Image (cartoon, rainbow, N blue to C red):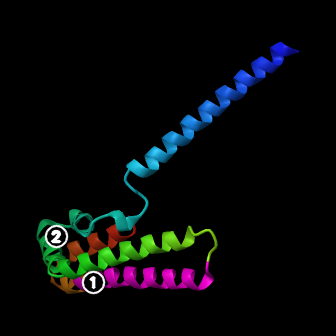
Amino acid sequence: MPFRRTRGKWALLALSIGLNLFLAGWIATQELAPFHHDRYATPPEKVTETIVRHLPAGDGEIMRHAIEGRMPQIKIAHREAADATNNLKQVAAAQTVDPTALKTAFDAMRSARQAERTLFIDAILEAMPQMTQQGRQDFINDMGRH
């Protein structure tokens, strides 16, 4: 019987070490890797490039000009949306969740994100009438992909 206990202890030790290594690796990837699924981690300039990339050259420049004219406000709204998202994460991660604080954090995040969206939409509304039919069609076709 002593042999089995020793073998069981080694198996338990190996399992424990393996689990600890797995958890350490997972924590490291969460802390060190970019936060890919949070679109508010994407800078507004990169969003602009994504919008412009699939447009004909002249139409892309029209769209870029309209967006860049609002870029100072877009950057402020983007930072506020990221801050509101981070605040929501903190409120939701609390030991006990205060429903009022949670609703307030969600409302603040929604409002901040909507402010950024509105600025991009205003730029698009300015650019589209100046674009070619092909550019407008390319823009509409690309909307569903992002």
Mark 2 — residue?
A: 60
* In this picture, residue 50 sits left or right of residue 106: left
Q: Which secondary structure lies at badge 1?
A: helix
Badge 1 amino acid = Leu
Q: For the residue marked with disc 2, what is the amino acid?
A: Gly
What are the residue bounds of the magenta stretch? 98-123
| Quadrant of the frame with the N terminus | top right
Q: Residue at x 51, y 85 (%)?
A: 104
Q: Residue 2: where, in percent of width, then height?
A: 84, 15
Q: Position of residue 48 (x, y in %)?
A: 23, 69
Residue ranking furthest to the front: 2
Q: Is residue 46 magenta?
A: no
Question: In this rendering, is residue 139 above or below 127?
Answer: above
Q: Quadrant of the C terminus?
A: bottom left
- Residue located 77% across and 18% down the image: 6
Q: Residue at x 22, y 64 (%)?
A: 49
Q: Main secondary structure of the magenta part?
A: helix
| Res 122 quadrant in image | bottom left
Residue 5, horizontal then vertical, whole percent: 81, 20
Question: Is 3 displayed left or right of 87 in the figure?
Answer: right
Q: Is residue 24 above or below residue 100?
A: above
Sequence-first disc among 1 and 2? 2
What residue is shown with label 1?
Answer: 119
Does residue 100 appear to the left or right of 43 in the view shown?
right
Residue nearest the viewer, comparing 141 with 145? 145
Please report contact status of discs 1 and 2: CB closer than 8 Å, yes or no: no
Q: Residue at x 15, y 76 (%)?
A: 68
Q: Quadrant of residue 42?
A: bottom left
Q: Nearer the viewer, residue 17 or 58?
A: 17
Q: CA distance from mark 1 to mark 2?
A: 18 Å
Q: Residues within 10 Å of mark 1 (few under 14, many from 20)?
A: some
